[in-house]
Image: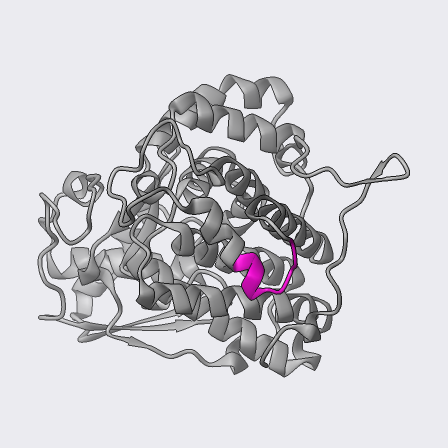
Amino acid sequence: VEPDPSLETVQRGVNRMNVFDPDVIIAVGGGSPMDAAKIMWLMYEHPDVEFEGLAMRFMDIRKRVYELPPLGDKAIMVAIPTTSGTGSEVTPFAVVTDRRNDIKYPLADYALTPNIAIVDPELVLHMPKSLTAFGGIDALTHAIEAFVSVLASEYTNGMALEAIRLIFKYLPNAYERGASDPKAREKMHYAATMAGMAFANGFLGICHSIAHQLGGTFHIPHGLANALMISHVIRYNATNAPFKQATFSQYKYPNTKWRYSRIADYLRLGGETEDEKVDRLILAIEELKRKVEIPATLREAVKESEAQFLAKADELADRAFDDQCTGANPRYPLIRDLKQLILDAYYGRPLVTVENNGKTVFPDFGPQPAMMGE
């Protein structure tokens, strides 16, 4: 299965399943093989299912106009992740790409959740450094967006916060030391699955909405696309007075800034006010990205020319607005907001400025072992 699996790949898999009628489907690999296997599973059991219905947007996954038929009559699915990042082994989501139109479709229904997930850290000891970095920040984005989602709950909060802490503490060592630090690999693998559990129930936001379009249009790895957008999205979301309310908020008053500040508190980043804590969270994320050698700007990751990128900016924003993840974002965006976020990430708009002798400094918040717990 190729990165960002296509509809054609899914259909080839279904055709092979139809030859011998398996009763167990085992997906081994990263997010792409697991996502492809979920759609293959669905189309194998229900060959007449309508893809247009699968991709239909909804406000609440539990109250859909179009519901997937139940799965498991012909086969069960076992997911075995060999990367630490997507969390697909425990989620009801699958992302498939329409190559003809360069569109990524994030599909969602609890019927797509694998029956069994085998989360074995031994399988990720030798992950390449780039995959470690991209997957780690992808998992971090899952946890952060799930924590501030309008559908966040007490159940998802704990999973999200602990996943964030583990990633900040162990990703640098997993990246630098690889198989020589099995504990870091183990903790990152668990963190990715915990983040998956969090966003399987709390859902995501516009960082993923934009990342889906960047991947579909410019073939940027999904984790990298999230890494390039997350700090800009935090800065955009961190307001207690949004001019447009979220569609399905589960709180009495907008509290996104407070929720970001709770993450900073959990990481012991310091700061007196909510604004200071949000700044410190953004700085900590940028510092973590530097440690794992993530590019500073979207421009560095896009192979096309600036003119080619800008020519597609409006279309990217339109598609991101229609993405399924947008509805759970704590601040409901305008299309022009999404375009501005894309441009900010492309040109590297400053997020936080800390002056020190006329220079912008991104402080290191102390050694990671200072964080509580293992």
Rendered position, 113 above or below 51: below
Q: Is residue 360 visible?
A: yes
- For the C terminus, the quadrant is bottom right
Q: Is residue 13 visible?
A: no
Q: Position of residue 237 (x, y in %)?
A: 46, 39
Task: Examine the structure image and report whether residue 347 is included in the region drawn in magenta.
Answer: no
Q: Which residues are magenta?
A: 263-271
Task: Examine the structure image and report whether residue 267 is included in the region drawn in magenta.
Answer: yes
Q: Position of residue 326 (x, y in %)?
A: 34, 39
Residue shown at the point (55%, 65%) measured from the top left: 266
Q: Position of residue 278 (x, y in %)?
A: 58, 47
Can you name the residue that lies furthest to the right here?
A: 357
What count of labels does the image hold?
Answer: 0
Locate residue 249: give its quadrant.
Answer: top left
In the picture, measured across the screen, residue 291 lies left or right of residue 100, that is right
Residue shown at the point (43%, 64%) measured from the top left: 160
Judging depth in this view, the residue of 47 and 336 nearest the camera is 336
Residue shown at the point (59%, 64%) measured from the top left: 267
Judging depth in this view, the residue of 80 and 99 nearest the camera is 80
- For the N terminus, the quadrant is bottom left
